[in-house]
Image (cartoon, grey):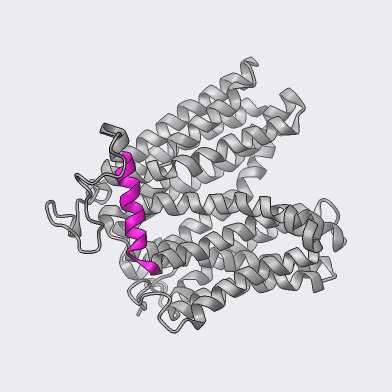
Amino acid sequence: MNTTNPPQGTIRAALGYPAFRSLLAGLAVSQVGDWLYNLALVTLVYQRTGSVMWAGVATGARVLPMVILGPVGGVLADRLDRRRVMIASDLIRLLFMLALAAVAAARLPVALVPVLAALATAAGTPYLACVSGTTPRLVRDADLPGANAARSAVTSLGVMAGPALGGLLLLVGSPALAFAVNAATFGVAVACTLAIRDRGVFAVASAAGSQPGIESAASPAPRRGSRPWPLLSGAAGVVFDGIADGAAALRANPAAVRLVGADLMCSVVYGMQTIVFVLVARQDGLGLHGYGYLLAALGVGALAGTTLAGRVVRLPHRLGVALTMGLVGLTMIAMPAAHWGVVVILLAVINGAGAIMVEVMTETGLQRMLPDDVFGRAYGLAVPASLAGIVAGSLIAPVLVGALGLNGALIACGGAATGYGLLLLTRRRPALAPVALAEVS
């Protein structure tokens, strides 16, 4: 193989673009910081209160604003220069991390912690929509799957490296030190964004081809004079109109909705795993610490899956979704029959690989299908839906275990994921439009 020309659609090919490398570097540093910050957040609250409930409140405060305000972040990503939005998002979060460090160091009231965590998350809501909307402008379309796989890979590495680094910082210092280090990661992310000199890649599109005054046929029609919220005006009206535009863009493309549905299903499965894996570890002789092994196995599988994602995207679309959803679902169905801990861990690795391939397929499909001028608003609905799926899965899990037992819950969860993939595969009409994920030559 010619090492100077890596295969199209792979991570190696995507890393050949200097501007994308800068974007990825900033995202990687930020991801590590986010995961070490989560560990420090829970540790600080629990040390100060001794209450699991307070720790749960802090964690919820960190996640909930993304679910609620994610659509607003998508609107901002479509209306404002994305470079400025990303820099502002990082700088604001940097300040909130320093504020959390001050709360920890000066022993200020612990009630400030969830408030600051929620504000930091709110400030970050436009960031991922900006990153996803900018990525297709930094690489050729044929290398877009590799770019999205690289982004998923750094997220998986962050899941593994962030808590480890956070634990080390807590060992040698305190939560205040961990918050300060996370603040520094946002500063590095700003520097990486500034390193991308072509500001045009961050410009928001007005319509087809980013040409002002030209309406895209695929874009939702504006609703001037027909706003469904007649009492709202000004900024509130703009936000609600923007969210409705994103929803209309998704409705206009059923293939995009089906991809979001697949990603949502994987999120529900993951939410259930965060609960039932405690019982699985105990049932299969791994002990309580085996819960950590199983979650780590998901991360290892996700990292491995990113290397295969570019190839899966080349498959016929319905087949690709069915296969990857099958990996997610069938591994859950097989867990009740696995009586050795090592087999369960292997199944978790395969499960994580399938889930990350679904994520990369969804990301790439949305970038290719949705009009650029409305992408942020649609993406701002898809990401919160995925996060809400994790919450829903964690709430459904105890109900299923109580009604069906552990093995029944695993089979029901896996059956739902597998069934979703089979439903797309067996539809008479094409489940995913050919334009969604064009064959990569």
- Horizontal arrangement in the rendering, residue 200 relative to residue 399 (left or right): left
Q: 132 or 233, which lies in front? A: 233
**Image quadrant in which the N terminus is located:** bottom left
14 inside magenta stretch: no
Residue most extreme to the left: 213
Determine if residue 178 is in view. yes
Residue at image position (65%, 38%) is 39
Q: Residue at image x 59%, y 28%?
A: 114
Q: Residue 65's spot in the image, x, y percent?
A: 50, 38
Vertical arrangement, residue 61 with respect to residue 24, above or below: above
- Determine if the magenta segment contains residue 244: yes
The part of the image, by quadrant, that contains residue 82 is top left
Residue 398 point in image, percent of width and height: 74, 53
Residue 101 falls left or right of residue 69: right
- Which contiguous range is marked in magenta? 239-254
Residue 57, horizontal then vertical, whole percent: 64, 33
* Nearer to us in this view, 398 or 386: 398
Total numbered labels: 0
Predominant SS of the magenta segment: helix
Nearest to the observer: residue 239 or residue 13: 239
**Left or right of residue 410, residue 440 in this image:** left
Q: Is residue 7 above or below residue 109?
A: below
The image position of residue 224, as x and y in percent, is 20, 45
Can residue 19 be seen?
A: no
Residue at 63% from the left image edge and 17% from the top image edge: 109
